[in-house]
Amino acid sequence: MPQPDDPAGVVSFAEARSIVSAHAAQAHPSRPAEAVPLLSSLGRVLASPILADRNQPPFDRSTRDGFAARASDWQGGAWLRIAGAVRAGQSADDLALQPGEAIEIMTGAPVPTGADCIAMVEHVEVAAGRARMAGRALRPGDNIVPEASEAGKGDLLLPAGTVLGAAEIAAAAACGYARVNVFPRPQVAILATGDELVEVADAPLRHQIRNSNSYAMAAQVMADGGDPRRLPIVSDDLDALLDAIQSSRGQGSDRGSGEGCDLLLLSGGVSMGKYDLVEEALSSLGAEFFFTGVRIQPGKPVVFGRLPAADGRPAQYFFGLPGNPISTQLTFTLFARTLLRALCGATDLSTPFLQATLAAPAQAKSGLTRFLPASLMHPPAQRKHEPAAPLVSPVAWQGSGDQAAQARANCYLVVPADAPDLVAGSTVTVLLR
């Protein structure tokens, strides 16, 4: 439920997800598709579908090393004359199986005309040019993949909007796609704010910290298909912040790396302190805010909105992410990632939640959906063919600035708002990173 001190614009987790999803549904890549070499497409999003250029498989294919014959001929342990052999990569067009015959065959080889099953080599007795199988029976079709059973010529294998991983690249290669049409990577401006920040290579004073958020956001952007453009650190100064935001749109002073970006990610400066100036700067540039906080922990001050079109530049979405490192990374995963995937052209915009068994208790907090750094494990199965449910345990942490705890975790334990404390052994929701 809303808290008494919540300002206007602060929404529930479910409302925030719905708002972002609605905007993501309308977002699309800002530049035309491009053709790239197949191996250069890893992690990119297909702009044109992949179609089968021929039947898959292009012939009836053996799935075993063994002997091709008629199922009826193997009955009763009858001896069959071995009439030839065929291996993978060899044509079987000149092999026509006659009744009472078997043809030796290798995995992946085309099945000779007249054969309707494959007897596995380990089940067959061979002697004096003959083969038999005793004590077993085969049915027509056993150990054969029929022609076109995987795909027919012209069938859709991968639709536009598919993210290309190893399996997808293999499928495209099998269809002869040496180059594929993909959407360009959206350019994402990354802007870390705060007087306390210094660059990673600098030696910080006792009261300073290194700019780790900029690197974390850039890594997350790259992992989800974007092209990060890290802008220089911005101090807690309104004019400097305005100039930096303008540079992400190719305006303002020349700061080099943010020109014409499709999405702006800011970290820090979104709370209610005297020097939290991000919302003020965005407001002065005419920003439309869709929410200015979400009832989650950590990450409550997260901001989502859009800067208007100006000077020939299109409107630009932005997220103001809280400055504490875990808050920054979590709010990117929960919200910014969805919009980024849409700007990449992806059709799957889902967030990776799953169910697990809680190994240790966790506390709820009134009014806030909690996301606790946690460790997800897959214990060995207790019974054959019955994998054990994954176990999740909260990681000890010192709050949303604890980067060591974040590095030890591999997921977040989700504790619903206004739920009772979670007890060990209960089924819980986990957010993958």
Image (cartoon, rainbow, N blue to C red):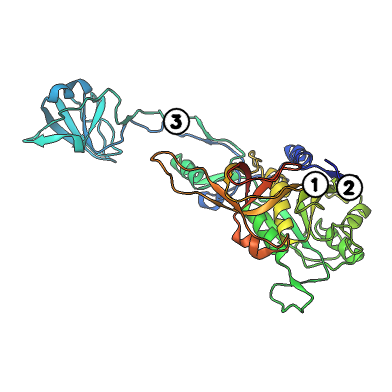
- The x and y percentages for residue 246 are 85, 58
105 shown above or below 221: above
Task: Name the residue at 65% across, 44% down.
Answer: 33
The kind of secondary structure element at disc 2 is loop
Q: Which residue is mark 2?
A: 6
Label 2, label 1: how far apart the Cα atoms are: 9 Å
The residue sitting at 45% across, 30% down in the picture is 151
Determine which quarter of the picture holds residue 234. Answer: bottom right
Q: At 19% across and 34% down in the image, what residue appears? A: 123
- Contact check, label 2 and label 1, Cβ < 8 Å: yes
Which quadrant, please, contains the N terminus?
Answer: top right
Label 2 to label 3: alpha-carbon separation: 56 Å
- Spot occupied by residue 133 in the image (x, y as percentages of width and height): 16, 30
Mark 3 or 1, closer to the camera: 1
Q: Specify the amino acid type for callout 2.
A: Asp
SS state under label 1:
loop
Q: Residues within 10 Å of mark 1 (few under 14, many from 20)?
A: many
Mark drawn on residue 295: 1
What is the crowding at mark 3: few (fewer than 14 residues within 10 Å), some, or many (at least 20)? some
Instruction: Indicate the secondary structure of the residue bearing disc 3.
Output: loop
Name the residue carrying label 3. 151
Give 397 or 171, whichever is nearer the viewer. 397
Residue 260: in sight, yes or no? no
